[in-house]
Amino acid sequence: MNRKIRLLMTMLIFGSIGVFVKKIELTSSEIAFLRGVIGSLFLLIASFLVKHKPSYKALKENALLLLLSGAAIGLNWIFLFESYRYTTISNATISYYFAPIFVMILAPWILKEKLTSVKVICIATAMIGLFLIVNPGAGGTSGTQNHTLGIFYGLLAAALYASIILMNKFIKNLSGFEITLVQLMAAALVLFPYLLWQGNLNFTSLTSTSIIFILVLGIVHTGLAYFLYFTSIQELKGQTIAILSYIDPISAVIIAAIFLNEGMTWIQIIGGGLVLGSTFLSEKLELKVAKKGQAPTTSA
């Protein structure tokens, strides 16, 4: 299968995550735990089938960062799934795409990168876009939804994802596939005692529909999607990957409109365009300064 088609399929799969999460009758922490378990099992089987042998020395050297980033992934999923519950998928997805902006803000202190005037404009533009999304009718409460809280959870998920991006920059001598596999396992490992503490490890009330959706989320949206992603980006240019990655939020908005009848006002659409446009520009800037044009990490 063509690499671009595989990446396109991956982004479309990621774009449909919100619809499936909304149909699962479990807490966000339970969904995140099961996603980590099922996804990591799928990738383990895939690694055996392709006879991939990770470097155990490199795994040991990066153990602390892998554990911390794995924990961040688990919490990131929890907040993202909570965002889906409290607001529309469109609002949650666009809020989540604030992650590159957070990276840009933190990079001068963590990565010692220069904060240029263009980056400042990107940050300001994204802030204006977020204000437009929250302000016109999205900031109140309607039915079971509290849009402001949902967008806040989306931003928390974005901040955690930004921390994962930054931590991954310090992980050495491991492929993206190896890093993702260990991070998924670490996410499940960290979430397990949290679920025990919360008393949420009770899956007896799961309906057959929820079981099907959680299996799809773990196998298709996690295991298969990450496998397709890392087998498609190996020979693609970084700019191509960055452009195709925006199929994820666009498809999420379209899928939510079709299956959940969700919509956005014109002002919110403009706000979303400002957020996505500023993050796209920030990623192009990062690709320019990168020495080898490394691919951006996955988004969901």
Image (spheres, rainbow, N blue to C red):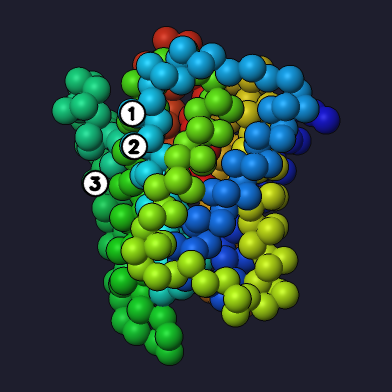
User: Pointer 2 and pointer 1: residues touching (CB < 8 Å)?
Assistant: yes
Along the polypeptide, which appears first: circle 1 or circle 3?
Answer: 1
Instruction: Name the residue rendered at 55%, 26% in the picture.
Output: 178
The residue type indicated by label 1 comes to Leu
Q: Are marks 3 and 2 in contact (CB under 8 Å)?
A: no
Mark 3 nearby-residue class (10 Å; few <14, some 14–19, many ≥20): some
The tag earlier along the polypeptide, 3 or 2, is 2
Residue 245 spot, x, y in % from top left? 56, 40
Q: Quadrant of the N terminus?
A: top right
Residue at the disc numbered 1 = 64
Amino acid type of the residue that numbered disc 2 sits on in the rendered structure: Leu
Picture quadrant of residue 230: top right
Q: Using the rendered image of the protein, determine whether residue 97 is visible from the camera's viewpoint.
A: no
- Residue 226: assigned label: none
Relative vertical location of residue 187 with respect to residue 64 in this rendering, above or below: below
Q: Which residue is mark 3?
A: 124
Residue marked by disc 2: 68
- Outermost residue, bottom side: 143
Q: What kind of element bears circle 1?
A: helix
User: What is the secondary structure assignment of the residue under circle 3?
Assistant: helix
Q: Left or right: where does residue 151 sit relative to residue 18?
A: left
Query: Observer-nearest residue: 97 or 277?
Result: 97
- Residue drawn 69% across the image and 28% down it: 47
How many numbered marks are there?
Answer: 3
Residue at 77%, 27% (x, y): give it: 49
Residue 264, x across and y down, in percent: 49, 71
Q: Nearer the viewer, residue 131 or 106?
A: 106
